[in-house]
Amino acid sequence: MSRPLTHAVLGACAALALAGCAVKKPAAPPASAASGAASANAAGVIACQAQEASSPLVGTWYAVSTPRGMAGQMQTVTVLKPDGTMSYESQLKVGKRVRPALRETGCWTYTNGIYTMQTTRSNGEPVDIEDPIYRNRYRVERVDAQRMTLREDIKGGQSSSAKKMAPNYRLP
C-alpha cells in the first residue's frame, strides 16, 4: 500500500505549515538519491525545484479515500506551492473515531503527466530520502480548476480523487 493515496491524494497526496523550500537532511545522500522531486546541494540541503505557477496542480487539495487493507476512511489535505514545496496532512476516520496519521513536508514535481511527492520531513523529523517510502508517484488522469484524479504509478495502483479547496483549508 502506498502512502499519499494512503498518504493520499495526492498522497498525499501534513501540517500545513512549511518553513520554506529547503530543509536540513540528517545526512547527505549519494547523488543518485537526489533525483526526482528534490536535489541535494553541497551543503547537504534538500532544495525543491520551482514548478510552473500556472500548473493546475498548484493549490490546496482535499481527498477522502479507503486505502486497501485499512478499515475506515483516510482524509487528506495536500498543499502544492509554485516554489516546489508541499505539505501533506492525513487522518484516519474509523466510525466516529478520528486518528491523526501523518504530517509531512517536502517537494513535488509534475512532469509528463506524472506527479511526484518527495517527503523530507515526517511529523517534523528529517527522513532518509533514499528510503523509497518517502517518494510517491502518481499518474494524473484528470485535473481541472475544481478536481483532480490520480492513480498510483505502480502496477494495479489505486485511484484517488481530490477536490480543490481554499488555501487556508484544514482537515475537519
Image: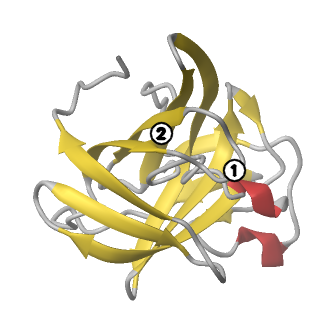
Instruction: Give the side of residue 12 with respect to residue 79, left or right.
Output: right
Q: Position of residue 139 (x, y in %)?
A: 45, 78
How crowded pointer 2 is (Cα within 10 Å; few <14, some 14-19, many 20+) is rated as many
**Residue position for label 1:** 45
- Residue at 69%, 34% (x, y): give it: 122
- Classify 106 as above or below 130: above
Which label lies toward us, 2 or 1?
Answer: 2
Q: Quadrant of residue 60?
A: top left
Q: Quadrant of residue 41?
A: bottom right
Please tell me whether residue 76 is drawn above or below residue 34 in the rendered image: above
Q: Residue at x 54, y 54 (%)?
A: 5
Q: As rendered, which of 53 and 62 lies closer to the eye? A: 62
Disc 2 target residue: 87
Q: Give the Cα separation between the discs numbered 2 and 1.
A: 18 Å
Q: Residue at x 66, y 83 (%)?
A: 155
Q: Who's the residue at 84% across and 50% down the image?
A: 128
Residue 65, position as x, y percentages in the image: 46, 46
Q: Give left or right: position of 77 versus 61.
A: right
Amino acid carrying label 1: it is Val
Looking at the rendered structure, the secondary structure element under dot 1 is strand
The mark found on residue 155 in the picture is none
Image height of 117 relative to 94, above or below = below
Outermost residue, bottom side: 112
Q: Position of residue 152 (x, y in %)?
A: 55, 70
Label 2 sits on what residue type? Answer: Ser
